[in-house]
Image: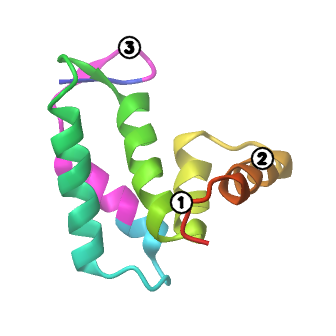
Amino acid sequence: MVVKRDGRTVPFDRERIRTGVAAACKGSPVDQAAIEEILTRVVERLAAFSSPVESAQIGALVLEELRRIDAVAAVRFASVYKAFSDPQDFEREIQLLSEDPQSGN
């Protein structure tokens, strides 16, 4: 089960993660196999969490995986996951990527 930001609890949906990751990776060199690897790693890591898990925890895991393989896709995903509201939000995320030696930039 997943606890959404508004407090609702919904069933875990792997397809929802796949859709978000695929949208973030659109136009990037990240292929379908890499997206599946991200999903597998995220689901495996979620198994260690107690249920229900917060949607923010899922988003953080996905973002961490995307940062490793494609910086642009990571920023795209972060803009939705973190609900960016102004250009400074993008600047902060890019700064975080530049400080992370394992990011895909």
Instruction: Identify the amino acid type marked 3.
Output: Gly
Q: Is residue 101 magenta?
A: no
Mark 1: amino acid: Gln
Q: Which residue is mark 3?
A: 7
* Numbered disc 2: secondary structure: helix
Q: Write the start and end of the magenta stretch as one range.
A: 5-21
Task: Kindly identify the residue that appears in the image at 81 percent across and 53 percent down.
Answer: 91
Near-viewer residue (28 or 9): 28
Label whose residue precedes the other's in the sequence (3 or 1): 3
Alpha carbon of mark 3 to alpha carbon of mark 2: how far?
27 Å
Mark 3 to mark 1 CA distance (whole Å): 33 Å
Inspect the image, locate mark 2, and give the three-letter code of the amino acid beneath it: Arg
Measured as percent of width and height from the top left, residue 82 is found at: 59, 39
- Quarter of the rendering occupied by the C terminus: bottom right
Q: Return the residue nearer the eye: 15 or 94.
A: 94
Q: Nearer the viewer, mark 3 or mark 2?
A: 2
Is residue 13 visible in the rendered image? The answer is no
Does the magenta run of residues contain 10? yes
Q: Position of residue 77 (x, y in %)?
A: 52, 55
Q: Is residue 103 visible?
A: yes
Residue 92 circle label = 2
Instruction: Answer few, some or many: residues within 10 Å of disc 2's Cα (few below 14, many 20 plus, some between 14 and 19).
Output: few
At numbered mark 3, what does the secondary structure look like: helix, strand or loop? loop
Left or right of 23? Residue 105 is right
How many numbered discs, if any? 3
Picture coordinates of residue 7 (x, y %)?
Answer: 38, 13
Q: Quadrant of the N terminus?
A: top left
Work out whether mark 1 precedes mark 2 in sequence or the reverse, and give the earlier one: 2
Q: Which mark is residue 102?
A: 1
Camera-nearest label, 3 or 1 = 1
* Residue at x 19% of width, y 17% of height: 50
Toward which corner of the image does residue 33 lie, by quadrant?
bottom left
